Image: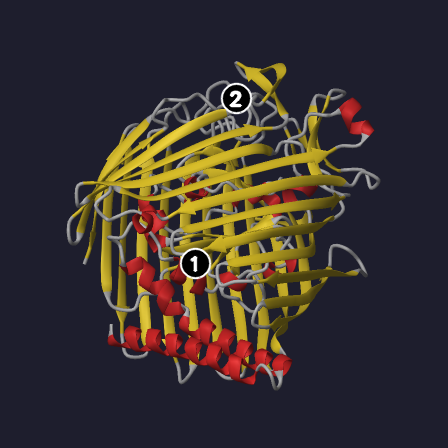
Amino acid sequence: MRKKQLNTMKVFRFKRFARKSYSVFNSLHKRVTIGVLSGCALINAHAAAVEPAERTHTQTTTDSIPLTELDEVVVTASKVDLPLNLAAKQVTVISRQEIERAPVRGIEDLLNYVAGVDILQRGPHGVQADISLRGGSFDQTAILLNGVNLTNPHTGHYTFNIPVNLSDIERVEIVQGPSSLVYGASAFSGGVNIITRKDTESNGFAKLEGGMHGLFGAEARGAYKTDGSLHSLSAGYKRSDGYIANSEYDIANLLWQSRFNLQNTLLDIQAGYNRKAYGANTFYSPSFPNQHDDTQGMFASIRGETGGKLKFIPHIYWSRHHDEYQLIRQGTPDVPDWYKGHNYHRSDVFGMNLAMRYASRWGITGFGGEFRNEGILSSVLGKPLEDTFGKYTHSDNRTNISYFLEHNFIFNHFTLSIGGLMNHNTAVVNKFDLYPALNASYRPSRSLTIYASWNKATRMPTFTDLYYRAGDHVGNDLLRPEYIQSLEAGMKYRNRFLGGSVTGYLNHGQNLIDWEYSDDDKKWHAVNLPENEKLKTYGVETSVSLHLSEIFPSAQPFRSLQIGYVYLTQDYDSRKEVNNPVSMYVRNYLKHKFTANLTHRIGRNLSVSWNFRWQERAGSYMRYVNAEKDERVDFSPFSLLDVKAGYKFPRVELFVNANNIFNTTHVDFGNIPQPGFWLSGGASMRF
């Protein structure tokens, strides 16, 4: 605790010194001095922001997050990890307190409460969900764990098969819009970076819960600290009998993390294992309600970071994902003769990158490169193998090579970031492409930030897009990469009582990949939109946060109110207005979404969090009745209300979750009904 106080005082004294120095030197060497002081301020903010971020998760009895702490959190919205208040992009941070208050059992459920995130759930509680940002598809969103890109090249359906429990998470950062420079070529419409806890002392945590539909969950986590290292191990398990036929699930997670402080050099090692087995009722084809999925994912990474004016940040990572997909579940009677067996897949990703950061009188420069290899072994996906390998008869492999450069000019009221990613993928012969990024922000006051950005990005088709041919789905091995450029402008306001933002953007997509339904052969086909059709997507995002405990006396029960709204629309050309095919992804987007969260107390120790969302989806789907095609229907809007009540003792919390209180009938993805009312409860303990 003493160390935290000293570091906090250092940050405070430095900021005071920087302000005084600026006023003294401004008249002499304005531009030079501001650059030096701002560069030093950023370095100190980067070094000191760790403890304010850690400080938030220890304050588990509070209901609101001080905005000063939130602003000091360093976010991965650029290659040099700027503090949140300097980020010139729309970045949403879900804090530790917000996670603890949410009536959820998985990260996917948690993201549902963010207005700017579109969740297409096939199964709840982390079974499977497609994550989309700004009208993009689930394959266009990069998913990272502590900066490790775990995006699955097989299919984005499995990208969230990562070994993380809710109790492991310190915060979630959501970067909206094309982010290839930040997260790599796969961050077509944005990225989600899950940041795990970095404990400051030895501790432990345990949680048990149960509920309707045979729900059971357990989590355990322990951290051990030595003089020069910190180690943590967590495990989690959850299961349910399912809310409809063939919707049961079993999910297990195991995560190990170690941090070593070696003479002004940090070394982070992490490894994890995830196992999911679940009934996949109509998940991929409504014609087959008895589908089943059994998946295993594992990963490991080593990351270093040196100190000093020039920082070296090497990173090596590996991930593997196994999948046994049963279109017709084992044990189903009367299996048709044409069904020859289940599908087996193994995807592997190996990557290494080196980033360097240099602080000078002109700002902060980041530069480096990355090598990333993606491969698959499969019984159906890829090119035929000369010699079979177990159950695998097909394979494919590709390598992505990229180089990046970014410089941040940081002045007293102004930040300008200029950079680009040079990218080559071996699947596209003899082609290097440049994806530039230009981001600027202006801070007329400490509370107000005005920003604008222009970014370009790309994405390679997944192996499923290229090769999947089964049932009524036909892949296309001639698919080309898709491209996007985006213009964005907005403003953010924060003070002790109020936070708010408004953002407008225009996305311009080319060669977009979609699955479209053909009336000719009654099948879904993977296609690129025609080259002359550059789909335009327009959107507006707004949010307001009121810290009611700061505005009104502490005697009143209300603590915080958060509201968010997103509007999105697309611009079709005349050809599509006439034909308008049934689209699985591109034209299936969230047109309106409104979210609201209210937190209040009942007495001293009982807190209640209400979470409401209303959404309306554009597009349509082919409705099936008794596994047979019926008619094409539009998505219907719906609203849901979830609530969590928690009673806290010094080390123990008792909680009750009530999801979908009004038992609303709804679908996120056509033909897959989502759960109605679901009640659960449990207890957690910290020690």
Q: Mark 1 or mark 2: which is in front?
A: 1
Q: Residues within 10 Å of mark 1 (few under 14, many from 20)?
A: some
Residue 476 on image: x %, y %: 73, 39
Identify the residue under disc 2: 335
Question: How packed is label 2: few (under 14 Cα within 10 Å), some, or many (20 or more)?
Answer: few
232, 26: nearer the viewer: 26
Residue furthest to the right in view is: 532
Where is the N terminus found, in terms of image quarters? bottom left
* Left-right relation of 133 to 296: right
User: Residue 123's image quarter?
Assistant: top left
| Amino acid at pointer 2 | Val
Which residue ends up furthest to the left in the rendered image?
Answer: 649
Quarter that holds the C terminus: bottom left
Q: Are marks 1 and 2 in contact (CB under 8 Å)?
A: no
Residue corresponding to mark 1: 195
Residue 413 position by quadrant: bottom right
Lower sequence index among marks 1 and 2: 1
Residue type indicated by callout 1: Ile
Q: Secondary structure at mark 1?
A: strand
Residue at (33, 59) in percent of width and height = 56
Q: Is residue 672 visible to us here?
A: no
